[in-house]
């Protein structure tokens, strides 16, 4: 069942990273500015992130199977709409539909793991799922670049739409709702209204702010690099071809597959996990500053590969979030975290597009401005996570605080 759910997550990884390869042909066909390109890449994540509240409620009230099967067809429709669009506005609408359809894709995996695996297995199994889901990014490396070069960018959307149909059929066939070990037999499912009100209790807890601040920049930095700026940076700064850029994207994705399982297996536990998360965030920020101020093809490619490997520590953030809230709030707590993560991606892609346009207008290297901006945002997120209030001891939060 988890493998079937992971197929939808892999497709969402493909959709969220295809802009890195599609950026040059889309700029040529639609005459897009850097800011419009950022808006195109961010539209998926705006929709994806904004729907996390409701997907978390749906999972807690209706179950993960019905939630994902109801939403995922929107991704298929959005991919087909994008493939046949001849207007930038329609293309954006397609991206929004894809974001809505993919909104529960990873959330259902994390909730399934949290409900049906022991707590000490959460980080390793989540890391494995993140690694397997990264197969979706492999598709948007060399294979997508080759397909676009041989046919057109529209063929890429059509291919992913067909893969999405197969994933939906697999989930409909394999996924069922087993019992929830560890959940009280007398626990009654919440209504949608009760679930919505309970989000307010999450915000009242002092440690929630630090968790959300860091969540909004870590994954965003990697996806903004791999999913948006990698292609333009290599093509325009270093003169790579589209297929050469696709090869680098493929390498980053392959390396990124090993990061989450490795981070999950090396999870130090709640006592030192947060210090490791902070240290990894600072290391990634340093890498972005190096790309910004010491540019060379070798440096940029090396940092991209290292960032792909280090990005696996995001699985530790999920483990940290799981331990910060009681079991009956798992769906909504994970949804809130995931919402912050993907709204952060949307904001960073839009904002860095605006930064690139402004830098170009001022005669400043736009890639230096973009990469330095991402480094600064990472540093601010790490500072907030380290200095703001921390969660109490794992599983020590009283249920009464949250209900």
Image (tube, grey):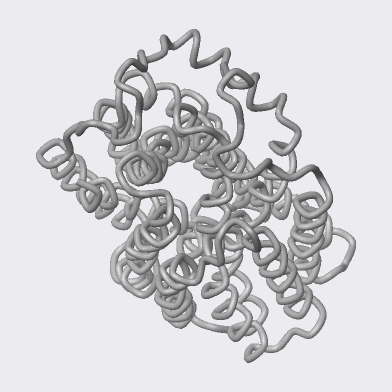
| Residue 174 rendering spot, x and y as whole percentages | 12, 42
In this view, the residue farthest toward the right is: 362
Quarter where residue 390 is shown: top right
In this view, the residue farthest toward the bottom is: 298
| Residue 217 rendering spot, x and y as whole percentages | 68, 53
Left or right of residue 197, residue 104 in this image: left
When the figure is inspected, residue 244 is found, relative to residue 324, above or below; the finding is: below
Of residues 116 and 395, the one drawn nearer to the viewer in this rendering: 395
Left or right of residue 69, residue 22 in this image: right
| Residue 99 rendering spot, x and y as whole percentages | 44, 38
Of residues 36 and 31, the one drawn nearer to the viewer in this rendering: 36
Q: Residue at x 80, y 61 (%)?
A: 379
When the figure is inspected, residue 365 is found, relative to residue 37, above or below; the finding is: below
Q: Which residue is drawn at 36% across and 49% down?
A: 118
Q: Which residue is drawn at 55% across and 44% down?
A: 323
When the figure is inspected, residue 237 is found, relative to residue 165, above or below; the finding is: below
Q: Residue at x 49, y 28 (%)?
A: 329
Of residues 29 and 255, the one drawn nearer to the viewer in this rendering: 255
Of residues 382 and 389, the one drawn nearer to the viewer in this rendering: 389
Q: Confirm whether residue 85 shows in the render.
A: no
Q: Confirm whether residue 271 shows in the render.
A: yes
| Residue 18 rendering spot, x and y as whole percentages | 44, 58
Left or right of residue 322, residue 171 in this image: left
Left or right of residue 70, residue 254 in this image: right
Quarter where residue 105 is shown: top left
Please state, as top left, top right, bottom left or bottom right, where the C terminus lies in the image: top right
């Amino acid at each position: 069942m988890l493998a079937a759910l992971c197929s939808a997550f892999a497709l969402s990884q493909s959709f969220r990273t295809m802009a890195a390869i599609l950026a040059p042909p889309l700029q040529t066909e639609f005459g897009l500015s850097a800011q419009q390109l950022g808006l195109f890449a961010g539209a998926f994540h705006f929709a994806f992130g904004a729907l996390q509240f409701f997907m978390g409620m749906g999972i807690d009230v209706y179950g993960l199977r019905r939630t994902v099967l109801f939403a995922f067809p929107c991704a298929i429709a959005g991919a087909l709409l994008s493939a046949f669009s001849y207007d930038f506005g329609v293309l954006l609408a397609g991206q929004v539909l894809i974001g809505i359809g993919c909104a529960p894709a990873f959330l259902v995996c994390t909730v399934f793991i949290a409900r049906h695996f022991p707590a000490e297995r959460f980080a390793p199994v989540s890391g494995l799922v993140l690694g397997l889901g990264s197969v979706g990014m492999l598709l948007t490396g060399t294979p997508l670049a080759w397909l676009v070069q041989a046919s057109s960018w529209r063929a890429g959307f059509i291919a992913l739409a067909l893969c999405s149909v197969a994933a939906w059929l697999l989930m409909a066939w394999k996924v069922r709702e087993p019992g929830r070990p560890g959940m009280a037999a007398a626990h009654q499912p919440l209504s949608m209204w009760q679930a919505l009100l309970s989000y307010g209790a999450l915000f009242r807890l002092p440690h929630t702010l630090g968790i959300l601040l860091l969540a909004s920049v870590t994954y965003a930095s990697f996806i903004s690099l791999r999913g948006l700026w990698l292609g333009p940076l290599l093509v325009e700064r270093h003169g790579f071809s589209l297929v050469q850029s696709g090869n680098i994207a493929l390498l980053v994705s392959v390396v990124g597959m090993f990061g989450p399982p490795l981070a999950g297996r090396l999870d130090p536990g709640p006592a030192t996990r947060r210090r490791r998360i902070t240290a990894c965030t600072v290391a990634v920020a340093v890498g972005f500053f190096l790309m910004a101020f010491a540019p060379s093809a070798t440096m940029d490619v090396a940092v991209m590969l290292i960032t792909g490997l280090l990005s696996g520590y995001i699985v530790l953030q999920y483990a940290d979030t799981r331990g910060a809230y009681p079991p009956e709030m798992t769906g909504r707590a994970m949804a809130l975290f995931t919402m912050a993560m993907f709204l952060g991606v949307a904001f960073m892609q839009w904002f860095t597009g605006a930064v690139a346009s402004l830098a170009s207008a001022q005669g400043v290297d736009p890639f230096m401005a973009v990469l330095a901006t991402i480094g600064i945002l990472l540093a601010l997120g790490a500072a907030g996570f380290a200095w703001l209030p921390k969660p109490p001891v794992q599983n020590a939060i009283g249920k009464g605080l949250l209900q």
